[in-house]
Amino acid sequence: MHAFSLPVSAPEQLAYRLLQDSDWAQTAQAAQMPAELRTVLAMVFDSPEPMWIAWGPQDKAFFFNDAYLPLLGGKLHGAMGARLDVVWADVWADVCQAIDDAFAGTARSFQNLRLMMDRDGAMKETWWTFSYSPLRLGNGEIAGLLCVVSEQTERVIERDLHSRQVAAITQEAREAHLELVRAREQLRQAQKLEAMGQLTGGVAHDFNNLLQVITGSVDMLLYGWPSDDPRRRYAQAIESAAERATKLTAQLLAFSRRQSLSPEVFDLCESVQALADIITTVVGARIDVELKLPDVPLPVLLDRNQLDTALINIAVNARDAIEGHGQVTLAVQRVSTVPSVRQSIPLKGDFAAISVTDSGSGIDPSVLERIFEPFFTTKGVGAGTGLGLSQVFGFVKQSEGEVDVQSRPGAGTCFTLYLPLTQCTDSMPRPAPHPGLASGGGLCVLVVEDNVDVADFAVGALRELDYGVVLARNAAEAMAELEHDATRFQLVFTDVVMPGTNGLELARTIRTQFPKLPIILTSGYSELLARDPGHGFTLLRKPYSLKQLAQVMTEAAHGSAR
């Protein structure tokens, strides 16, 4: 048994003395100790559990049994005159006050005190519990303390392991919750788009058929009237209103991702370079337009017209956000990762990032999440439809890309369009426009159209352009005409949405049976075309003008001649 004696009044300056058991038996403390306490002390000496006794509230003597010595890290040996707070440096700050409190009658335990111990030749971190019990004299006075020490290292390790496991589970649960929130938001957005798509898709076909009759009739009137006819301005007003209605329908279809795209392979850098002149005109002289393009081509498979429209829509918003002189920067770069946007998961792959950055007033955080909603606008009445950014959103998503917005009030806004690159590098040149209204030269067209009014316009317009016309009301009639004598036709011009066999199925059947016969599809809206943009047929969207009809017919006829 080893004893340490130190006064209680000044623990920071106190030393202990090391006594052998036999030496201690001759000390005054041993002589004054009652026989009952000597019995307790003997029990402590013989216990295999680490224990110690502090005796005397004034001049404390600490007695450690042999089982406790490893906890002192071998510091007893040769430590004559050393300070007890040095021997117990690991726990002294905790136990010093606890010992004084225990002598004062307030016993308490210390859970999981940390001690550095020699384990297998290396100092390792261990954890122990110190439990204090008072040793009282017959009069009830506390004359000493018994401290039983038990190792808790394994339990603490298990607890920490459990805590880490719980933390990992908690983190997994948090990530799962975030994933659930993300999935719910994506579902909500998908449901909103589906509802919008059903609404717009349901009316777009019939609405565009009506617009086709209006715009087509106006076209025919303007084509036949002299340029100085006073009635022209009324017809032109009708034409302008119909064009705005057509644009609104197209933008709604774009947002709901149900527009019929016409993807083609082209170099994105070249396309943005060509569009820069138009954007410069759109934003005006007070705003500088800067281009940052890479030196290498970036091939994409996209609807070029829809991309141009999207970038112009963003540029218009940038122009309206800039007061006085400002700058708009168009930058294109290749990226391999698309960040998480609006709760969506990050995307990896080959993408082109087109950013449009302005020096305008920025977007208030309270409205930033709503800017892509149809008809939402912060502009004044008559200053915007609220559909420009909806078209951007719909086009990018339908093209399997993503659009991100970064903005701070007063610090400008940056729109970034992430669009997938294609492995195909064979760019498709845009056909050269044909000036004026090219004559059909007597070529015969098989027109397939179930709508009476639209059919009347199409037949009349083609005859006005000097084409011969045979009208079929459905796919069955069209096939009957072809099977009777296909050689008399140089073109097939068919609607897509028809009762029975639709126009796309008809076109594929004709291509199989009469592979050299050119086919042109026309539709105001068709979910079939929206789901299958790679159908491989020329598409003329309704409502189309007399000039557009003449151009597409000429291109198809010339392509057949080659």
Image (tube, rainbow, N blue to C red):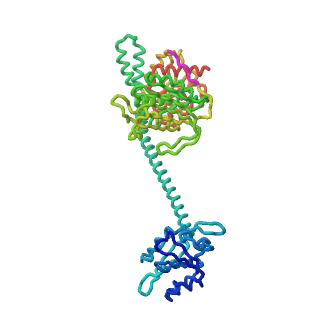
In the picture, which quadrant includes the N terminus?
bottom right
**Residue located at (52% from left, 33% from top):** 354
Magenta residue span: 429-435
Q: Residue furthest right?
A: 121
Q: Is 406 in front, or is 201? A: 406
Residue 270 visible in image: yes
**Residue located at (36% from left, 28% from top):** 383
User: Residue 427, percent across and down?
Assistant: 60, 27
- Residue 392 inside the magenta-drawn segment: no
Q: Residue furthest left?
A: 381
Q: Where 434 sits versus 16, above or below? A: above
User: Residue 301, percent across and down?
Assistant: 57, 32
Quadrant in which residue 488 is drawn: top right
Q: Where 181 sits versus 518, above or below? A: below
User: Residue 229, percent across and down?
Assistant: 36, 11
Residue 501 visible in image: no
In the picture, which quadrant includes the C terminus?
top right
Q: Main secondary structure of the magenta part?
A: loop
User: Residue 465, percent across and down?
Assistant: 48, 16
Q: Is 173 in front, or is 450? A: 173
Q: Is 443 in front, or is 553? A: 553
Q: Is 485 in front, or is 81? A: 81
- Residue 431 inside the magenta-drawn segment: yes
